[in-house]
Amino acid sequence: MSQENHQNYQPQHIAIIMDGNGRWAKKRFLPRFVGHQKGLKSVKRLVAHCSAQGIKALTLFAFSTENWRRPEDEVNKLMGLFLRALQKEVSKLNDNNVRLLIVGDRTAFNAEIQEHITIAESMTCNNTGLVLSIAANYGGRWDIVEAVKKWQLANPDRSVSELNERELSPYVALSELPEVDLLIRTGGEQRVSNFLIWQIAYAEFYFTEDLWPDFNEESIDKAIASFAQRERRFGKTSEQVAK
Ligand code: FPP
């Protein structure tokens, strides 16, 4: 069996839409923010677990371009949590050989957050273990439009009419990483919500009712086991893949 169909094969790049923090808190009559705090704990556990399992890349949707529409107080608290995580967790990531990338339009964040993003990325840039990408103020459509702009900047004498998938691909976020193999969404919804549109072209999807703060090592192992059962054909027939 070719390795291309990935049966019994560990995903190299897992992307997660972390949903359900608010509902987790509501069920316990707690403020939504407590759900986000608990959600950060899940992030830390899963980063350690994926790192230990030898997963190459983990990409987490922390804040979408649409999340600015949330109540101001919740947005401010999420920004505070993001900043504290950048300040507190980076040396731990470094100790574990994790490389941190932040993807998304960072110009919308305040100067202090932007500064800590730069520090965190440069501190961990030579690490060779898990690549942890945090999508913050990220949207899949934004990403594709940015890629076209970057391509045009790099090729000022060429017309966009000459552009093809192969040439655009290096300008899309996370192009230096293996393709996303497995996309997980917690919280019961089954949609992509403008996450990595380009990058999930061939990903397997895994949806779970688990709310993000409840999603733990065992839960991700279940998702990985489900991935390993699936036959990935990349447009080919089962017979071709089996050769
Ligand atoms: C979705 O739950 C979660 C978010 C929009 C924020 C994600 C943030 C974290 C997991 C914590 C911080 C993480 C980092 C990396 C600093 P929701 O609020 O939409 O839940 P609901 O659908 O139940 O309301």
Image (cartoon, rainbow, N blue to C red):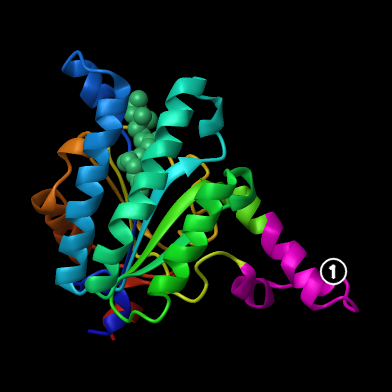
Foreground of the two, 214 or 207: 214
Q: Position of residue 154 (x, y in %)?
A: 78, 77
User: Which region is colored magenta?
Assistant: 145-171
In reply to whether residue 154 is colored magenta, the answer given is: yes
Do we see residue 20 in this rendering? no
Residue at the limit of the structure toward the top, as seen here? 29
135 left or right of 223? right
| Residue at 22% in and 84% down | 1
Quick one: which residue is furthest to the right in this view? 157
Residue density around tag 1, few if under 14, some if 14–19, many if 20 or more, within 10 Å: few
Q: Amino acid at mark 1?
A: Ser
Query: Which element carries disc 1, helix, strand or loop?
Result: helix
Q: Residue at left 76%, top 63%?
A: 149
Q: Is residue 39 magenta?
A: no
Q: Quadrant of the C terminus?
A: bottom left
Compare residues 38 and 8 and report the one nearer the observer: 38
Residue under label 1, please give it.
161
Q: Position of residue 26 (x, y in %)?
A: 24, 17
Is residue 107 shown left or right of residue 93? right
Query: Viewer-proximal residue, 223 or 24?
Result: 24
Magenta span: helix, strand or loop, mainly?
helix
Quarter-of-image position of residue 54: bottom left
Q: Residue at x 49, y 20 (%)?
A: 71
Of the four image quadrants, the one with ligand 1 is: top left
Q: Is mark 1 within 8 Å of ligand 1?
A: no
Check the image and report above or below for 9 versus 89: below
One can see residue 123 in this view: yes
